[in-house]
Image: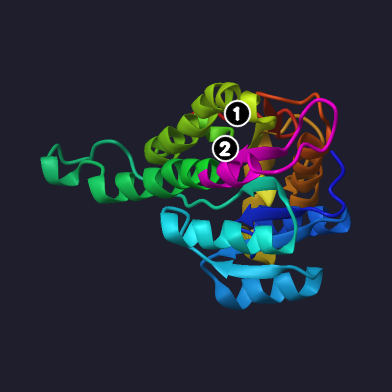
Amino acid sequence: MDLNGSSALVTGGASGLGEATARELAARGSRVVIVDMNAELGEAVAKDIGGVFAAADVTDTDQVIAAVEAAKEMAPLRAVVTAAGIGWASRTIGRDGTYESAHDMGAFNKVVQVNLVGTFNTARLAATAMSQNEPVDEDGQRGAIVTVTSVAGLEGQIGQVSYSASKGGVIGMTLPMARDLAVAGIRVNCIAPGLIDTPIYGSGPASDEFKSKLKRDVLFPDRLGSSREFASMAAELITNDYMNAELVRVDGGLRFQPK
């Protein structure tokens, strides 16, 4: 699918994986809407790539609809990448055996709301807009959605129960959503990134030491991945017309150990 003359929407597009993906899609000819909570970073990225910024909480239907409409105003919406997400680390039970020290339910619900519900909310609304597009080819293709999970959704580590549950849910949506949207000519694929070197790890000697320990389970190459490598895969899943209903790992052969 050619992205020239189309628009795209990237959640979490102000930094990290989302920013890299927004830049990649813009380089391929798409007008990109950056959806994020961070207005300062989001507006800067949007200005740099000739797109627009839309402040939105991905769990808020009205805000996501506004972002989708902003994309439609520029050009037909044909590509969506759901890179917005949050993390949380906590074991299921505490060390003292009290009910109070068990995993906080507020935190669990928040992670699931943002990572899983927010992904579905974005996908369902963007797909609705895509379904109104004219087909771009003889196959009747109207758009493509790339959701973002994590290898933790497949092999979560100790303390990742809420994060893994939310990301596992994203994986579980891939096939049925692709089946739902086939009638509208919309493809759905999912990326499971491994350990990607983003600003979340900070910088400097302490950060370098921490990242050196993190990469212990990466098979090859012997490093963390780059956000650009993730973005390249996202763009491939959008533009390759025969990629549908797939989960693709971008992890250098990583397999998480329990901790």
Up the image or down, 67 lies above or below 178; here it is below
Secondary element at image label 2: loop
| 253 or 212, nearer to the observer | 253
Task: Judge whether residue 146 is colored magenta.
Answer: yes
Task: Judge whether residue 103 is colored magenta.
Answer: no
Of marks 2 and 1, which one's residue comes earlier in the chain?
2
Query: Cα distance, mark 2 to mark 1?
Result: 19 Å
Viewer can see residue 247? yes
Q: In the shown orientation, is residue 185 left or right of residue 171? A: right
- Asked if disc 2 and disc 1 are in contact, CB closer than 8 Å, the reply is no
Q: Give percent across and percent down for residue 51.
A: 74, 68
Mark carried by residue 149: 2
Magenta stretch bounds:
125-149
Q: Give percent across and percent down for residue 251.
A: 71, 35
Dividing the picture into quarters, in which one does residue 222 lie?
top right
- Residue on which disc 1 sits: 181
What amino acid is labelled 2 in the image? Thr
Q: Give percent across and percent down for residue 232.
A: 82, 44
| 199 or 7, nearer to the observer | 7
- The 10 Å Cα crowd at callout 1, few under 14, some 14 to 19, many 20 or more, is many
